[in-house]
Image (cartoon, grey):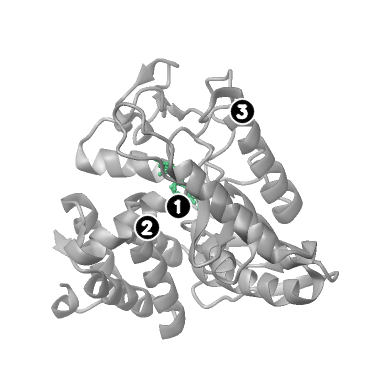
Amino acid sequence: MRIDAPRLESFVCEIFMTAGAAAADASVVAAHLVEANLKGHDSHGVGMVPAYVANIRADLLKPTRHAAVVRDAGAVLLVDGGFGFGQVVGGEATDIALERVRSTGVVCVGLRNAHHLGRIGAYGERCGAAGMVSMHFVNVVGHEPRVSPWGGREPRMTTNPFCCVVPQRGREPIVLDMATSMIALGKVRVAHMKGEPVEDGALVDADGVPTNDPGVMMRQPMGTLGPFGKHKGYGLAVMCELLGGALAGEWTAQPAHSRGQNIVNHMLMFVLDPNAFGNRDAFEAEVLAMVDYLHATAPARGFDRVRVPGEPEQEARRARLTDGIDVDDNTWAGLVKAAEVVGVPSASVP
Ligand code: NAD
């Protein structure tokens, strides 16, 4: 199914409104998910709708909740998402940080108990668009862990995303936004839906044998995802677990916490105003010059050119806005089923 972004967004919005969300909140979530598809991250796009609907029906995702500040210590704030839509409470927590950083120069916001935040880059891009630097450490709990530590073959964490954003004068911000597993769990789901193998080194089966079959994550006994970048990627995943999980959320993947079908994210977010260092012009000029220097690198064999983080997403977005978004048959069937379950009239299905 190929569909243009506005039609897909309004269908998804109607599903969430029918499931009990206010129109404004449903629209925020739908826009976030479709933006993920536009940016090439189908793993974090509309394919998440059935899981969100299931969690609303199981009362794990509370569609009317908003972010609440539970501790305000000036440049440090703690925000509780109350298990509301991650896209809603995550956006609100980011706005709280952006408002505060104007007076403090730097701010650290802990967001706890958000249902799935989706693409973490969305919050970083919001900071970048406001001219701020930002850094986001996120952990994922509420279900069984899926990612093994470096050197292990049993899962201990999930795909713990990390994001860092640097604004650029007159250009889109540089956005490093990534899972700390070799591939995002959602990409395993997408490969499974499409019947495609995953890349070498991404998965081991339940016996610890490397495999390209995404199906090992869909059946019992379940396989595991490995961390990216050997011990270094694993180290970053641990920091996401400890900063997002232990500090902001007081809830890590350790087994004393209950596990079920929920998808809960905790995020520790730092936002910094480059003006606070006193010479924004010099910073911006240096960023532009360095990025130009990177872009001017001669490409290695098999590459067309050198990019900076965030550019693949910008390119995907331009192409998909023009050509439409390809939604594979299994994902589309899941979306239509979710619409039916919540009671969207069949006439509304595109
Ligand atoms: P990815 O591997 O596709 O990209 C990771 C980063 O590398 C991006 O910043 C991208 O711009 C950059 N990049 C890719 N190719 C590049 C190139 N050729 N040159 C320069 N930079 C390049 O992303 P991923 O790890 O699969 O993560 C996908 C999404 O999943 C992210 O948006 C992440 O936030 C999200 N995620 C969310 C959760 C959650 O619990 N909410 C968990 C895991 C991942």
- In this rendering, position of residue 179 left or right of residue 196: right
Q: Nearer the viewer, mark 3 or mark 1?
A: 1
Q: What residue type is labelled 2?
A: Gln
Task: Determine whether the beta carbon of the residue marked 1 sits less than 8 angstroms from the nearest atom of ligand 1.
Answer: yes
Q: Are marks 2 and 1 in contact (CB under 8 Å)?
A: yes
Q: How crowded is mark 1: few (under 14 residues within 10 Å), some or many (20 or more)?
A: some
- In this rendering, position of residue 237 left or right of residue 220: right
Label of residue 232 in the image: 3
Q: Which of 81 and 54 is in front in this view?
A: 81
Q: Hey, which quadrant is residue 44 in on the image?
A: bottom left
Residue 142 horizontal/vertical position (percent): 56, 49
Q: Do the residues labelled 2 and 3 touch (CB within 8 Å)?
A: no
Q: Which amino acid does label 3 sit on?
A: Lys
Q: Hey, which quadrant is residue 52 in on the image?
A: bottom left
Quadrant the C terminus occupies: bottom left
The residue beneath circle 2 is: 314
Q: Distance between the residues labelled 3 and 1?
A: 21 Å
Q: Compared to 211, does 284 lie above or below? A: below
Q: Which of 94 and 322 is in front in this view?
A: 322
Q: Are marks 3 and 1 in contact (CB under 8 Å)?
A: no
Disc with the residue nearer the chain's start (2 vs 3): 3
Q: Is residue 265 visible?
A: no
Give the residue drawn at x 78%, y 68%. Answer: 105
Label of residue 310 in the image: 1
Give the residue drawn at x 59%, y 72%. Answer: 130
